[in-house]
Image (cartoon, coloured by chain):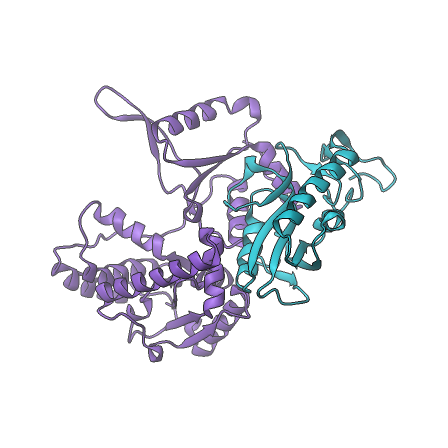
Amino acid sequence: MAIISVSGDPGCAHEDLARAVAQRAGFELLTCRRLEESIAADFGSQEIPERAWPPLLRSAIARSAVNRHVVYSLEGGERLFHGFPNVLNVLLIAPPRRRIGAVMVDRQLDREAARRFLRESEIDAVAERKRRFGRGHSRLHEFDLILNDDQHTPETLAVIVEAAMASRGLLDQGMLSAAAEAQVQFQARLQLAKFGLTPPDRAAGERNGFSHPSEEIFARLLDFYRIEWQYEPRSFPLQWDKDGHVIEAFTPDFFLPAFDLYVELTTMKQALVTRKNRKIRLLRSIYPHVNIQVFYQKDIQDLIVKYELAERASTH
Amino acid sequence: MNSPSAPPPIERVLFTAEQIDTRIREVAARISSDFEGRELKLVAVLKGSVFFLTALARHITVPLRVDFLGISHFTNQPGAPGVVRIAKDLDDAIEDEHVLLVEDIVDTGFTTRYLLQNLAGRGPASLGICTLLDRTSRRIARIPINYSCFEIPDRFVVGFGLDHKQLYRNLDCIAVIRPD
């Protein structure tokens, strides 16, 4: 297996770099949010002590590494597989000017407010890192590669990471063997037992197949613009019978965490979307806090025309 | 595809040349007022925004400079660039300058968001967006638009810089077409 860890200070584009590496190398991308959601799904409302996070994260990442090489983006992530072979720890740095600029755009703040926000984010990051990993700051000697974001795009930096992977021969190794994964999980269980937590056995973080070509095109479009997405991550119950069983639900195609937005693609003809529109109206009335954007057939066709896509999405 | 000599398949004209000119003058006056006493840099995204930039710049009264950016475009073809990148960078730095990103159309907001992120990292004194057309119905990326000439419906439009297969940019109006 190859495991690439990408860290960076607040305001650095380390998630973008992780995404670019994943795309370039064909690795599974595990973002901080995705890992936290996976752990939350496993443990429900159970309170997770901060010091239990390292073994939990190690357990979740190792489960994914059985099937695919993995790149993850996580504050303090360089500590997770310390001493393991076939691990490359990458740190992304950037000058304050660039990080403030990123916050200005992401948070829609003016420069002074962005500067304050960044400072507070740095303090929060140090505190969280200390709570989870017992140390507030990273140690530079624990990284294999330190990259400066200032004059490079994530794509060009990903080329450097890929070269580092090749020089270390990371891809020459197979996936994490079942025996090695079992060993990682055994160690994680031992550590988690102290907190009364038991990790599940099922594989996590696997990418689902798409049910329609237009969804795959849309996912590629999001990847192109480095926008994190999740495919059908949640179903919303819409109707229940008298015993409280769900008899109707709606599962939007995509969730975009950066915009807190669900996206539903429909390639049916406009005249046939009445039933789906009713579901979406129902969803909006029951879950008014949920943001959902619907792309209809003509929207998708426009995207296809706009980007001159060779493979036209067929209708269903 | 239409032959070069065939007339554009216009379904209807959305905004005439006169309407566009009037609205651009109004927006240029607002920009001139907002940036009074300061210098401005207009950054246009190749190729579609060039038509709008030249029309807008002529009616802005504060001192201004112009520069251009080109970006790679999404394609579903194998071997195409996997992520968006700058294909033609600005000629000059924008640090401590008041920058207005000039767009022909903001649709999903993906491209504009990427450009904003890229430009914001270069330390401008301020950074805003001015777009000729704003199609809010398909917006996914929430981005602040400071100046917008027209909000348009959910239709495919060409003219005044906007193309279909690189054609019709030179129409002096903005029109809805029926793509083949």
Residue A127 falls in image quadrant: bottom left
Q: Is A310 placed above or below A182 here?
A: above
* Chain letter matching colour cyan: B
Out of A136 and A157, give the one closest to the viewer: A136
Q: In the rendering, at what x and y percent does residue A158 appear? A: 50, 67
Name the residue: 29% across, 73% down. Answer: A82
Residue A66 in view (yes/no): no
Name the residue: 56% across, 37% down. Answer: B136
Q: In the rendering, at what x and y percent does residue B37 appear? A: 64, 56
Left or right placement of residue B88 versus residue B58 in this view: left
Residue B149 falls in image quadrant: top right
Out of A94 and A113, give the one closest to the viewer: A113
Residue B102 in view (yes/no): yes
Residue most toward the right? B5
Name the residue: 67% across, 49% down. Answer: B32
Q: Is A144 placed above or below A262 here?
A: below
Q: Is B3 placed above or below A8 here?
A: above
Q: In the rendering, at what x and y percent does residue B15 appear? A: 73, 33
Name the quadrant of the C terminus of chain A.
Answer: top right
Residue A306 falls in image quadrant: top right
Residue most toward the bottom? A141
Name the quadrant of the N terminus of chain A.
Answer: bottom left
Q: In the rendering, at what x and y percent does residue B121 appear? A: 52, 63
Residue most toward the top? A242
Out of B112 and B123, give the one closest to the viewer: B123
Left or right placement of residue A265 versus residue A286 in this view: right
Chain A, which colour? purple
Name the residue: 38% across, 57% down. Answer: A31
